[in-house]
Image: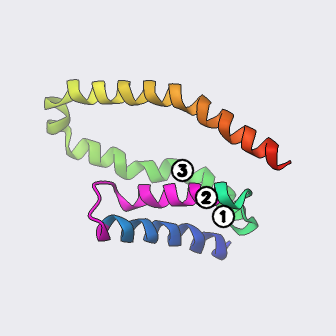
Amino acid sequence: MLKGLLILIGFQLAGDFISSYFQLPFPGSVIGMGLLFVFLCIFGKTPKPLKATSSAIFPYIPLFLMPACVGAMSYWGLLKDEWVALILALTVSTIVAIITIPHILRVTLSMKNRKQ
């Protein structure tokens, strides 16, 4: 399980490094997740240590959301002032996700079927 945790932390640190080195406007953790996704797509299957670690920490995902909720409460005044822009951004991003995810799934499944 330690090996899987080190893999996750390694990708997060790589994302942080890329974000700070290239001065990107994206958080390093998001870049790290993207790198992990690309790695898993190239590798073709999830390594056993990573699968074990992911299965072990999955039930605790709601705890990882707690800091975001606390942050939202801390910036309540800003959210209250910018609620229209926030709702618009959430709506547009949801629509984009609903449209693009099936296409990504279809491409991924066709790539997987070609490998078999």
How many angstroms separate mark 3 from mark 2 (CA)? 7 Å
Q: Which residues are magenta?
A: 20-40
Cα separation between marks 3 and 1? 13 Å
Which colour style is shown? rainbow
Q: Nearer the viewer, mark 3 or mark 1?
A: 1
Q: Which residue is mark 3?
A: 61
Kind of residue at disc 3: Ile
The residue closer to the viewer here, 2 or 88, is: 88
Q: Mark 1 is on which residue type?
A: Thr
Looking at the picture, tell me which residue is in the foreground, 83 or 14: 14
Q: Amino acid at mark 2?
A: Ile
Q: Could you tell me which residue is drawn at 56 percent across and 60 percent down?
A: 36
Q: How many other residues sit within 10 Å of disc 1, few (<14), some (14-19) or many (≥20)?
A: some
**Apparent side of residue 54 relative to residue 77 in the rendered image (left or right):** right
Q: Pointers 2 and 1 in contact (CB under 8 A)?
A: yes
Residue at label 1? 53
Question: Are circles 3 and 2 on residues that touch, CB within 8 Å?
Answer: yes
Estimate how packed mark 2 is, as few (under 14), some (14 to 19) or many (20 or more) residues with alpha carbons within 10 Å: few
Q: Main secondary structure of the magenta part?
A: helix
| Residue drawn 47% across the image and 61% down it | 32
Separation of disc 2 and disc 1 at Cα?
A: 6 Å
Question: Total number of numbered labels?
Answer: 3
Horizontal side of residue 82 vs 54, given as left or right: left
Q: On the picture, is 50 further left or further right than 12?
A: right
Q: Which mark is residue 57?
A: 2
Percent x, y of residue 109:
73, 39
Asked which secondary structure carries label 2, the reply is helix
- Residue drawn 51% across the image and 25% down it: 99
Q: Residue at point 36% right, 52% down?
A: 67
Above or below 77: residue 29: below
For residue 90, the mark is none
